[in-house]
């Protein structure tokens, strides 16, 4: 029997369960099954960074639904639309079931032995001829901790390549960078529980209502209860989140630093500075005060477009609140001065002394579910256990742990960030690129360039995924991967809370878990330690977790007190978990001591303008020894601004019903039907100026490419257009519609996170009955889309009289 406790498509956040700061967040169990489960298996949702606890319903060896876990600290039983429906992707008919090898220009079925032998042969040839520096890895924010750690050890101690990063570079690199710059190490100071008791919530560039729907339900329940918190929202669009704001500030894209400087200035002017806290626990306040002095409300209005009186209203709330939780996401991370802006949010808390206390915390949010683990394990541009690449003692710790020579572990420069990895592929110094569980042919900026790189003759591309993505089509070898529900592992949400997610069903066909694939590769490559023993000494998820625990001992993300048994018995446990904190740690820095001392810090810091690293000598000369670092920044103009030729700002973002490039959510029927297609959102004024009506086709062009989208009019400032970036070509190759055809190849100097949030574009009404231009930017993008489908789809493309999609039936997502 099917069960659906609520219609999460039409009622995204579900019924209110109001509560005040004096009572706990009530339970509400959401469930969606298509048949009666024979058994329930413990899982955790992997469709956003919230990490909601759930049970997976299984019948006849198939997943038939999910049910929220009432006891889970993260969701108390609730699930959002993606969580309730996304599991259907597991049962898709088009799952990859066998390895594929490109032969005679076509991907053809192969055995695992054939595929892995080819990967190993090419790896050896390339390492022999070009060194390990020719090997690159581009991983995900969706694998499990055990998989990342194994990959990190393969890369750093097996091959010895610095070229490993994840798509987390696109989503959470700035979160890590901002936390490191201010507090010395990655790791969120606060906890979700702070939202239950706080007086004020500040969302900066974070449409939480769409991106972490259950966390927003938690806030809605506070707003509906006694003593609700005030809500300050900073977002250029009138989103679902902004609709509930006490004050909504809508700055022009790319001006976050100016706005935040203005708010800090107002807090200082109001005399709301906690000088005792600053004196005891921070360094750098005087420079911040001097820097923000010139950001008067009137000047901020000129720079950002936010009315001075609105800024004052927000400033008053932030200056008078007794407690404050701030959340930050892509509106900051993917924009101009990303790290500098995110750090100003940290500064706001430090200036007010609102950190490490109940109701006061900072959530530099993650975009993807397991992004935190990519960072913890060093499968991105970090070292495992939040170690510092510039601290030889930290390298020695890893060398001892893995029993490999000190110099085997690359540390002569920072680990290569993703954008540079792609650049090395472009210039030819990286000749082997292994991509796992991500889809850069839709998610990276400037897609025309990405396609050209993926097609390079001298680049051997391996793609490991569950589906034939837009990226997999370009691979030399495709490995079919098991996904959530088909493998066991752990991961950590934004709130530092570790969950376990268990295997409920077998993967389809010959698909294997990412961990098994990495272990197989390590065995075939015969990676050895200094004693001639196998480098990788673990063999399954639990033994990997035990090995990982040893890597974290004494580090901020200390897992040594955790076991699979403990995780299964509980319902999410926040690290550090060790002898001192056997039940986990709700919030960090309660004693005002930060991990900034030179011997312990994860970074020595970088210059916000240039990205230049502070040297160890410079850092030690002014060793903060446990004080937080207050780092100011001056506003800088975005690098590309509208002009006569391209007079509008483009900004990109996500929708509530989809995750990433829709590889999974696009295969869940209810989600796909709720948001079937991309669109371009524009203001009434701009629509009228260009003669565009609701649902008209619109040609959007930038200097890099062009797309054609339906018009969605309203709820956006004049001069700004918005396009969701989820949509590639796997299910609709009829027209170019990926927002990243338009975006810039540029990144933040510190976090190296690309700038997706602004680009200069022009728009025009497009007659879809006309033939697509055969040449030029638009033509090339369409050709690329067509090349991904078979002849039947090509025919439908050339014969269509209009693009086949219906008018914008999707629900308007705030
Ligand atoms: S809020 Fe995130 S983790 Fe929770 S159910 Fe929704 S998608 Fe899954």
Image (spheres, rainbow, N blue to C red):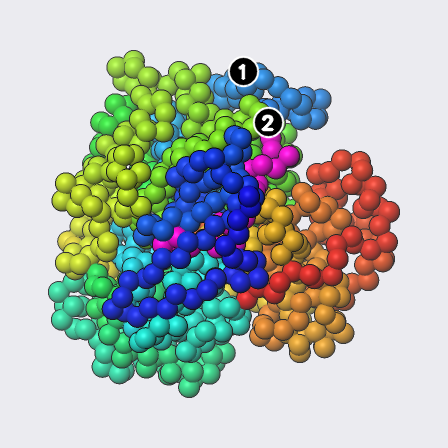
| Left or right side of 603 for 729 | right
The foreground one among 793 and 701 is: 793
Res 672 visible: yes
Which of 488/272 is in front?
Answer: 488
Look at the image and say whether residue 80 sits in the magenta stretch: yes
Query: Can you give x and y, in whole percent of width and height, for residue 393 in the image?
Result: 20, 36
- Separation of residues labelled 1 and 2 (CA atoms): 15 Å
The secondary structure type at the circle numbered 1 is helix
The residue positioned 58% from the left and 72% from the top of the image is: 716
Circle 2 sits in a helix, a strand or a loop, which is it? loop
Q: Can residue 549 be found in the magenta stretch?
A: no
Residue 97, labelled with which disc?
2
Observer-nearest residue: 488 or 432?
488
Q: Residues within 10 Å of mark 1 (few under 14, many from 20)?
A: few
Which residue is tagged 1? 113
- Does 87 sit above or below residue 180? above
Magenta residues (range): 75-97
Disc number lying in front (1 or 2): 2
The residue drawn where x is 47% and y is 50% is 31
Name the quarter where the C terminus is drawn. Answer: bottom right
């Amino acid at each position: 029997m099917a069960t659906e406790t609520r219609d999460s498509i039409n009622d995204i956040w579900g019924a209110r369960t109001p509560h005040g700061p004096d009572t706990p967040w009530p339970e509400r169990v959401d469930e969606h099954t298509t048949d009666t489960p024979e058994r329930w298996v413990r899982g955790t949702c992997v469709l956003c960074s919230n990490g909601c606890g759930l049970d997976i319903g299984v019948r006849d060896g198939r997943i038939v639904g999910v049910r929220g876990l009432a006891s889970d600290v993260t969701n108390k039983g609730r699930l959002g639309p993606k969580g309730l429906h996304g599991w259907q992707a597991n049962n898709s008919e088009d799952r990859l079931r066998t390895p594929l090898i490109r032969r005679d220009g076509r991907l053809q079925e192969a055995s695992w032995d054939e595929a892995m032998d080819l990967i190993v042969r090419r790896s050896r040839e390339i390492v022999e001829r070009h060194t390990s520096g020719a090997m690159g890895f581009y991983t995900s924010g969706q694998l499990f901790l055990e998989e990342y750690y194994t990959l990190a050890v393969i890369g750093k101690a097996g091959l010895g390549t610095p070229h490993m990063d994840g798509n987390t570079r696109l989503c959470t690199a700035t979160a890590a960078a901002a936390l490191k710059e201010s507090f010395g190490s990655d790791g969120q100071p606060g906890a979700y529980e702070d939202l239950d008791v706080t007086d004020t919530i500040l969302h900066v560039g974070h449409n939480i209502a769409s991106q972490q729907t259950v966390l927003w339900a938690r806030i809605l329940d506070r707003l509906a209860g006694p003593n609700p918190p005030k809500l300050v929202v900073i977002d250029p669009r009138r989103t679902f989140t902004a609709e509930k704001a006490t004050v909504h500030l809508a700055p022009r894209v790319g001006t976050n630093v100016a706005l935040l400087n203005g708010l800090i200035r107002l807090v200082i002017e109001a005399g709301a500075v906690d000088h005792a806290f600053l004196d005891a626990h921070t360094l750098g306040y005087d420079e911040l005060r001097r820097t923000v002095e010139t950001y008067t409300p009137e000047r901020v209005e000129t720079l950002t477009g936010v009315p001075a009186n609105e800024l004052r209203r927000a400033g008053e709330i932030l200056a008078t609140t007794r407690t404050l939780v701030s959340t930050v996401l892509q509106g900051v991370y993917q924009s101009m001065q990303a790290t500098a802006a995110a750090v100003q949010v940290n500064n706001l808390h430090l200036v007010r002394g609102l950190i490490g206390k109940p109701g006061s915390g900072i959530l530099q949010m993650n975009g993807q579910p397991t992004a935190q683990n990519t960072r913890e394990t060093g499968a991105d541009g970090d070292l495992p256990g939040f170690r510092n690449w510039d601290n030889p003692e930290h390298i020695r710790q890893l060398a001892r742990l893995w029993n490999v020579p000190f110099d085997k572990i690359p540390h002569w420069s920072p680990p290569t960030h993703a954008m540079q990895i792609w650049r090395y592929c472009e210039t030819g110094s990286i000749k082997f690129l292994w991509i796992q569980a991500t889809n850069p042919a839709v998610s990276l900026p400037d897609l025309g360039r990405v396609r050209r790189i993926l097609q390079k003759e001298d680049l051997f591309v391996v793609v490991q995924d569950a589906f034939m993505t837009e990226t997999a089509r370009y691979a030399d070898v495709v490995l079919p991967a098991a996904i959530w529900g088909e493998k066991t592992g752990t991961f950590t949400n934004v709130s530092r809370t570790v969950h376990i997610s268990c295997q409920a069903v077998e993967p389809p066909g010959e698909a294997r878990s990412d961990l098994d694939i990495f272990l197989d590769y390590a065995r075939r490559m015969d990676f050895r330690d200094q004693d001639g023993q196998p480098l990788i000494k673990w063999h399954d998820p639990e033994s990997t977790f035990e090995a990982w625990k040893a890597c974290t001992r004494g580090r901020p993300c200390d897992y040594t007190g955790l076991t699979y048994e403990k995780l299964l018995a509980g319902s999410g446990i926040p690290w550090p978990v060790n002898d001192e904190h056997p039940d986990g740690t709700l919030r960090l820095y309660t004693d005002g001591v930060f991990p900034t001392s030179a011997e312990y810090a994860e970074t020595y810091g970088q210059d916000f303008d240039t990205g230049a690293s502070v040297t160890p000598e410079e850092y030690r000369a002014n060793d903060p020894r446990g004080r937080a670092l207050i780092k100011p920044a001056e506003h800088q103009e975005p690098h590309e601004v509208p002009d006569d030729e391209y007079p509008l700002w483009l900004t990109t973002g996500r929708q509530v019903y989809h995750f990433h490039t829709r590889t999974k959510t696009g295969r869940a029927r209810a989600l796909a039907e709720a948001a079937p297609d991309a669109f371009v959102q524009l203001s009434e004024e701009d629509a009228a100026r260009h003669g565009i009506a609701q649902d008209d086709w619109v040609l959007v062009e930038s200097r890099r490419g062009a797309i054609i989208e339906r018009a969605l009019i309203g709820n956006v400032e004049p001069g700004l257009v918005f396009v969701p970036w989820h949509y590639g070509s796997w299910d609709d190759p009829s027209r170019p519609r990926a927002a990243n055809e338009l975006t810039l190849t540029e990144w933040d100097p510190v976090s190296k996170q690309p700038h997706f949030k602004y680009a200069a574009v022009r728009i025009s009404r497009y007659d879809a009955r006309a033939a697509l231009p055969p040449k030029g930017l638009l033509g090339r993008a369409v050709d690329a889309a067509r090349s991904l489908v078979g002849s039947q789809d090509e025919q439908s493309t050339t014969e269509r009289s209009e693009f086949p999609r219906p008018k914008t039936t999707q629900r308007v997502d705030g």
